[in-house]
Amino acid sequence: MSNIFSPRVRKRKAYFTAFQVFGSYLWLHLKSKILGKAHFDKHINSLHVKNADRVKNRVQELQGLFIKMGQLISNLSNVLPEEFRGPLEELQDHIKAKPYSEIEETIFQELGKKPDELFGNFRKEPLAAASIGQVHRATFKGEEVVVKIQHQNIDTIAKADLTILKNIVRLHGFFMSMHGLDHTYDQVRQMIEEELDYLQEAQSMQKIANSLKDAPELRVVIPKVYEEFCTKKVLVSSFCEGTNLSQVATFKEWGLDLEEVNKRLTELYCKMVLVDGFYHADPHPGNILINRQGELILLDFGAVAYLSEATKRAIPDLIEAVVRNDTEDTVLALKRMGFLGSDKASRKYVEKLIDIFKEFLQTEVQFDGLNFQNVKLNSGLSSIASILRKVDLRDVSNNIRIPKDYILLNRTIVLLMGNTFLLAPNMNTLHVVRPYMQQHILDKEEGFSTLIINTFKNQLTTAIALPNELSRFLKTQNESELEDELRGVKENIQKIYFLGQQFLYAFILFALVYFLVNVEIGDKLWVRRMNWGLIGVFSLLFLRAAFRDVRT
């Protein structure tokens, strides 16, 4: 194993880059406290660009799981600054292939024979390379096949990288006072571990292929799996000729109707997600090919996900609760969907979500008649994207646990929206989605008219109960006003507290450095190591206090 794949080296390089990024933002914040907000606004975008390049270059150097994490992050457009996404998106296509000697060794270890003994015309140059494995073309009994081989030691590297990423996530939460990131990390770790099992990927391919047998009109091709050659680290499937979905000019030369292709692509994901509840969760353009006949070819089933029946049933309840401004039912629906947080924190955050959804319903949604079938979005799917941009990651992480299935669903929707825009930018995709939503998500027997009746009943009940609740409301209102008055005092006290912490930690650091430089400790190496350890601990505490001071 080369030096770069040594866990110790990877830790040192990853942590160094993380401290570079965190430190650069802290330094800008501290300078801006003296030089003013104009200084911050002037330099923040260039700092984003500089840090994005730092992260991209380090990820490309470390490879392994960091490539996968960079790809995942590049798709979270509501989390990252705009300047980060471009450099990280380059990670989708710039992955170095492993030497053939490693491929040959892995196949021999997994299948007991060398590639040339198992396949005919096994090509040493890979067809494609990814963060976890790479693909080679070959033939088997006269049929064209592709052999997907996992990189050597990727499981060991992944274990080390996950530990590094977990520590970086905790460090980020420590400085930024973000809770719940450990849960999000656990969800991402589970996704990565699933992708490392090619046997599970083979099963997913077969399951989705079987579910699409009853929809020949979609004209979808799923590669055939050769089970006798499939192990945890090797997967063999049929070769399917096609062109990357992003090559729109080529498709036009072939004379394909791109709106019709786009319609089938959208219907395919509606069927997988809303009807079957099990779907291909990585619709990156490189994983969707189109052949000359206009057929859609799905590749790479390492990332798949479920949409549970409980989630599908909870979606209309969530919409109804938001329309009725019913916090209790909104919290209940979110819990049923797997977004779990403490009751008090969830309630406060849900109130913010209700305001976002109410504004969305008022400005973007049109109801023509009393049925969900006639729902229209003024700005199409961009309306949904606008909601995502209004949800702050810190608020989400502090109040709501994000299920793995939602992370994958969000990523799938973002990628799919990009694909549909590439193929047919003027097509109204919502016209395709609406019938599936109506039939499989929003089709409650009583229809939308019952929602109106429930809303009226809710308002009537509130009116009847108002005399009994009025005094409680006024008491709560008075408490809220008092809370508003005290908030400013609390913030000032917090600033004094964090400033005092900074002075205290700075004094301790000065004392530790003075002791290290001026006190003779002879050959007591353990004393010197302990001193350096304490310097590291109090440096972190000082930086944390400075970060919190900046944020208050």
Image (spheres, rainbow, N blue to C red):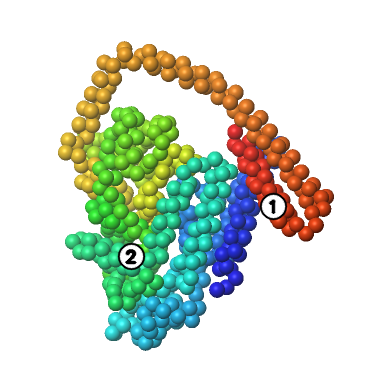
From the viewer's perspective, tell me whether residue 406 is left or right of residue 293.
Answer: right
Asked if the residues shown at circle 1 and circle 2 are in contact, with their CB atoms under 8 angstroms apart, the answer is: no
Q: Where is residue 157 in the image (x, y as percent from the top left)?
A: 50, 66
Disc 1 packing (10 Å; few <14; some 14–19; many ≥20): few
Residue 284 vertical position relative to residue 491 in the rendered view, above or below: below
Quadrant location, the C terminus? top right
Query: What type is the residue that disc 2 sits on?
Result: Gln
Residue at 28% from the left image edge and 34% from the top image edge: 320
Q: Name the residue under label 2.
A: 200
Q: Quadrant of residue 476?
A: top left
Q: Where is residue 170 in the image (x, y as percent from the top left)?
A: 53, 48
Q: Where is residue 184 in the image (x, y as percent from the top left)?
A: 44, 49
Q: Where is residue 110 in the image (x, y as percent from the top left)?
A: 39, 77
Residue at 26% from the left image edge and 27% from the top image edge: 455
Between 77 and 133, which is closer to the camera in this rendering? 133
Residue at 44% from the left image edge and 52% from the top image edge: 186
Q: Quadrant of residue 139?
A: bottom left
Residue 303 vertical position relative to residue 429 in the rendered view, above or below: below
Between 315 and 362, which is closer to the camera in this rendering? 315
Q: Mark 1 points at which residue?
A: 530
